[in-house]
Image (spheres, rainbow, N blue to C red):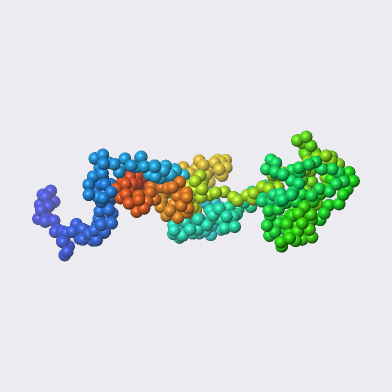
């Protein structure tokens, strides 16, 4: 036997038999383990998709095909005003929401690497991910409230605005009965020219006592001054029936502190003055023979902020709430990718003379391009299904302006009882999501092979 083997004869020893599993072949065992998952997948994913496809070709009652050979529901996707508006807003969402969230995530990830408290900052930015969409929607419904006393956004906006353009304290002031003032150019003017040495009375009403400026004091009758025009602008109102006298400064009445008075001659302002705390004012001799004007700036309505949830800004406002939630998600993924970037490449760029902006733009971003693409594509898939925020944040008056496909699907299927069109929207969303999802899977596989 040994000589035969040495001579080159073939070895005829039998190959060892493969050991067979007690429960059957390995394929059978794998199928048994996969069966529960396959059943759930079929019941929860495959069957609903198949049923939605079939239902999208049927009429509202489901007992026959819709018009135009079953394609009437798909035709409605491009002819129904509600669906077209939802499709337009969905395009806005897909273009801007992932881009803004990814850009902010990139900025946060890069900056947190350069600060000592970066971990705490990441925790704060990522924290909104722990909040449900429902809770986030309620939070931002309050944030965007029109009333600056309740809405944080308008409270900040009004505060900044009033810093540079203070609103008037007398928005509803107007002349009362038997007043020497008459309306002109959104303000009020005296019906006759004034004379030096003769005190002028400018009585107004319409401001609630609790809305008067804190600086206002009890009004005082102006004293005549030779060569000057003096007068009083005050709230000609006294509580109690029959107590006050019209056109006369009574002891309990308040002056219009800060009221601007202009003397106008020939259409030109020749002198101006501001009323003191007691409402008295003094104009120089140039005002003699002029008409006194209370300009419109005295009666400007207080600035009430921006209508965040109005038809114009409602979609950007809701996108802002979405970015607040998902920027932390983008930051965490990008920070993980940034941790894998070779530091020697960044240092080499700095040694070659590149500043931090050039290192970021020409080295960091190109190296993070695969991660940025995965994050952006994942967020695109997510925004195609956005529903909760759009359903909760916009009020009923502007919900049509903020409508998206997922919300329109709900409205068509439940509010309007048009399940055929709702199913067509669902199939259309699936068609939009599948290519993006396949692109994401291919990129992930490509990264694994590397």
Asked whether 421 or 107 is in front, the reply is 421
In this rendering, the answer to whether 210 lies above or below 94 is: below
18 displayed left or right of 368: left
Rendered location of residue 336, percent (x, y): 45, 53
Looking at the rendered structure, the number of numbered marks drawn on it comes to: 0
Observer-nearest of 448 and 427: 427
The picture places residue 44, in percent across and down from the top left corner, at 28, 56
40, 62: nearer the viewer: 62
Q: Is residue 198 visible?
A: yes
**Name of the residue lying farthest toward the right:** 226
Res. 262 visible in picture: no
Image quadrant occupied by the N terminus: bottom left
Q: Please tell me which residue is depicted at 68% across the width and 55% down the height of the picture.
A: 207
Q: Position of residue 143 (x, y in %)?
A: 53, 55
Image check: 139 left or right of 448? right
Most extreme residue toward the top, as rendered?
266
- Residue at x 82% of width, y 54% of height: 221
Is residue 76 or residue 184 the one in the foreground? Answer: 184
Quadrant of the image occupied by residue 245:
bottom right
Residue at 74 percent across and 54 percent down: it is: 236
Report whether 151 appears left or right of 90: right
- Identify the residue shown where x is 70% and y is 59%: 209
Name the outermost residue toward the bottom: 22
| Residue 319 sits above or below residue 31 on the image | above
Residue 398 position in % (x across, y down)? 47, 49
């Amino acid at each position: 036997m040994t000589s035969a083997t040495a001579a080159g004869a073939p070895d005829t020893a039998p190959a060892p038999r493969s050991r067979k599993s007690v429960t059957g072949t390995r394929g059978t065992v794998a199928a048994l383990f996969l069966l529960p998952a396959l059943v759930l997948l079929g019941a929860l994913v495959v069957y609903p998709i198949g049923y939605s496809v079939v239902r999208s070709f049927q009429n509202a009652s489901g007992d026959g095909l819709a018009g135009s050979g079953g394609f009437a529901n798909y035709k409605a996707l491009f002819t129904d005003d509600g669906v077209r508006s939802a499709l337009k807003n969905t395009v806005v969402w897909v273009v801007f929401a992932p881009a803004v969230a990814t850009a902010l995530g990139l900025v946060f990830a890069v900056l947190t690497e350069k600060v000592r408290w970066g971990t705490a900052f990441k925790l704060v930015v990522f924290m909104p991910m722990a909040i449900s969409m429902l809770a986030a929607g309620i939070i931002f419904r309050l944030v965007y409230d029109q009333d600056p006393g309740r809405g944080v956004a308008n409270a900040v906006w009004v505060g900044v605005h009033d810093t540079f353009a203070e609103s008037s304290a007398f928005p509803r002031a107007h002349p009362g009965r038997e007043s020497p003032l008459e309306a002109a150019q959104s303000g009020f003017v005296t019906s006759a020219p004034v004379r030096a040495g003769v005190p002028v009375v400018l009585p107004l009403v319409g401001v609630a006592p609790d809305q008067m400026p804190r600086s206002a004091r009890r009004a005082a009758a102006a004293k005549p001054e030779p060569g000057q025009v003096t007068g009083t602008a005050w709230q000609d109102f006294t509580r109690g029936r029959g107590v006050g006298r019209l056109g006369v400064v009574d002891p309990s009445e308040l002056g219009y502190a800060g009221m601007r008075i202009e003397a106008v001659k020939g259409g030109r302002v020749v002198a101006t003055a501001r009323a003191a705390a007691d409402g008295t004012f003094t104009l120089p001799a140039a005002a003699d023979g002029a008409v006194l004007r209370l300009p419109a700036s005295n009666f400007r309505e207080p600035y009430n902020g921006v209508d965040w949830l109005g038809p114009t800004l409602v979609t950007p406002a809701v996108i802002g709430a979405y970015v607040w939630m998902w920027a932390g998600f983008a930051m965490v993924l990008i920070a993980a990718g940034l941790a894998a970037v070779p530091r020697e490449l960044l240092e080499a760029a700095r040694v070659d003379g590149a500043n931090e902006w050039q290192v970021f733009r020409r080295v960091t971003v190109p190296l993070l391009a695969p991660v940025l693409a995965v994050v952006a594509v994942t967020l695109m898939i997510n925004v195609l299904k956005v529903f909760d925020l759009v359903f909760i944040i916009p009020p009923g008056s502007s919900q049509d302006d903020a409508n998206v496909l997922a919300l329109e699907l709900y409205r068509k299927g439940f509010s309007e009882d048009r399940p055929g069109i709702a199913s067509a929207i669902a199939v259309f969303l699936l068609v939009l999501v599948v290519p993006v999802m396949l692109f994401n899977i291919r990129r992930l596989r490509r990264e694994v092979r590397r």
